[in-house]
Image (cartoon, helix red, strand yellow):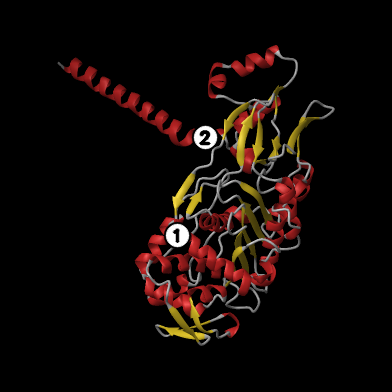
Amino acid sequence: MQTNKKIIHTLILMSFLFFSIITYLTYFELFTKEKIINSPYNRRQFQQEESTLRGSILDRNKKVLASSKIDSKNRQERFYPYGALYSHLIGYSSKTYGKSCLELNYNKQLLNISEYSSVFGIDKIQDKLSATKRKGNNLILTIDHKLQQKANTLLQGKKGAVVAMVPKTGEILAMVSKPDFDPNSESLSDHWREMVESSDSPFLARATQGLYVPGSTYKVVTSALALENGMGDRSFEDKGSITIDGKIIRNFGGNAYGTLDLKGALAHSSNVAFSQLGVDLGARTLKDMAARLGFNQKIPFDLPMNKSVFPYKAMHKTDMAAVGMGQGKLLVTPLHMAMITSGIANGGMMMKPYFVSQVTSPTGEGLEKTSSSSLSKIMDAKTAAQVTEMMEAVVTSGTGGNAAIRGIRVAGKTGTAENELSGKQRNKEHAWFIGFAPADNPKIAVAVILEYSGSTGGKIAAPIARDLMASWLGKE
């Protein structure tokens, strides 16, 4: 009898251990495997790379943006012919510092690693049979190299980000963050410590990971809510300031615009009007729209992307007023702001953003292809059309005149956003501009932000957006 109990206890213990192993292996397979495989500290990546010529990365027109070459000592070196231009998109691949961006997220494809070949040792067998290095797969991007160069030139000497995308598909055409860095090995080695310690944060991909108060660009969202909630015919008496729950809210520069309808309020970017709208729309409506837009949610993308933040739980009238005009505790990434702009341009449908369009074999055979897909319906088509018309007025008769392109209908919105420095120092506001063109058949949408610019979005961000849109539309 005692022996039977010992056998039962032993079986229970063995069963527990067996199920623990199964549970751990399942957890590892579902949640941990990719992180460990892609870890820059995983030395097996470099063992694989010793026998594989890493694949190239090309733009939409097949221009090579990153490639590998073999030096005189038969060592592989990653080469970035355009230096810093793609540092926040393609990233770097270094034996010393690991990998980042696409080089990290698409490491398996670039090394042509398959799970089955790794498990059964097929790669090693092929290596022994071959006197030359195996070749990895290539990545084809949606990026247009000429437009990327244009965006880079327009942002030269500034801090901030530019994003340009196709509203109907979600394809990223250009994405630049400044400051940047040269990802080539020699430059990384020479400047690594300096860049890590720099207060300019050159490793920060501002377009996808920078979080900024949207300022008056968010008024397009408040305008959509006003239209949806029967406030489209409302008029406002703008005397330059208004007091809400004891707090005085002023227009930028202290301007007074008199009697305004909703279109005029957006064209002149009236804080008086939009703070009132925020209060009248109410907390629930503002929160619901933020959820519709994807705030506090992870947006799927080819690179790591910070969540935009709508942090309010309980909202006071002053909070509603601040959100109505795009201020307060709202934070958004430039890419997300470009997506919202694209959603308006695309009849209210916000598309999933992407910029890896295809993975091809070394011989050019298509292996993986990305298809356009919708992310969320942020407003109905009628509302989107009305907001578009109002955004056109911003450019034709309001604060966005510097975004006008001869012969092209442009829709846009300027923004001058307060931040942690602007409350203490003068001329430290962020300058924004969002827009798309042609307004009647959108082919490109743009978001521009310039950090601590000391100027307005209409003066310095709108011309950058204009030049970028004009370049893509062949109107330079």
Q: Amino acid at mark 1?
A: Lys
The location of residue 411, given as percent across then percent down, is: 59, 63
Label 1 residue SS:
helix
Image quadrant containing the C terminus: bottom right
Which residue is at the front of the view, 73 or 414?
414
Residue named by callout 1: 382
Q: Residue 274, relative to residue 218: is it above or below?
A: below
Can you see residue 159? no
Label 2 residue SS:
helix
Residue named by callout 2: 34
Residue in view at x 72 percent, y 55 percent: 471
Q: Is residue 102 left or right of residue 194?
A: left
The location of residue 222, given as percent across then percent down, is: 46, 68
Residue in view at x 71 percent, y 14 percent: 130
- Quadrant of residue 334 within the rendered picture: bottom right
Residue in view at x 22 percent, y 20 percent: 8
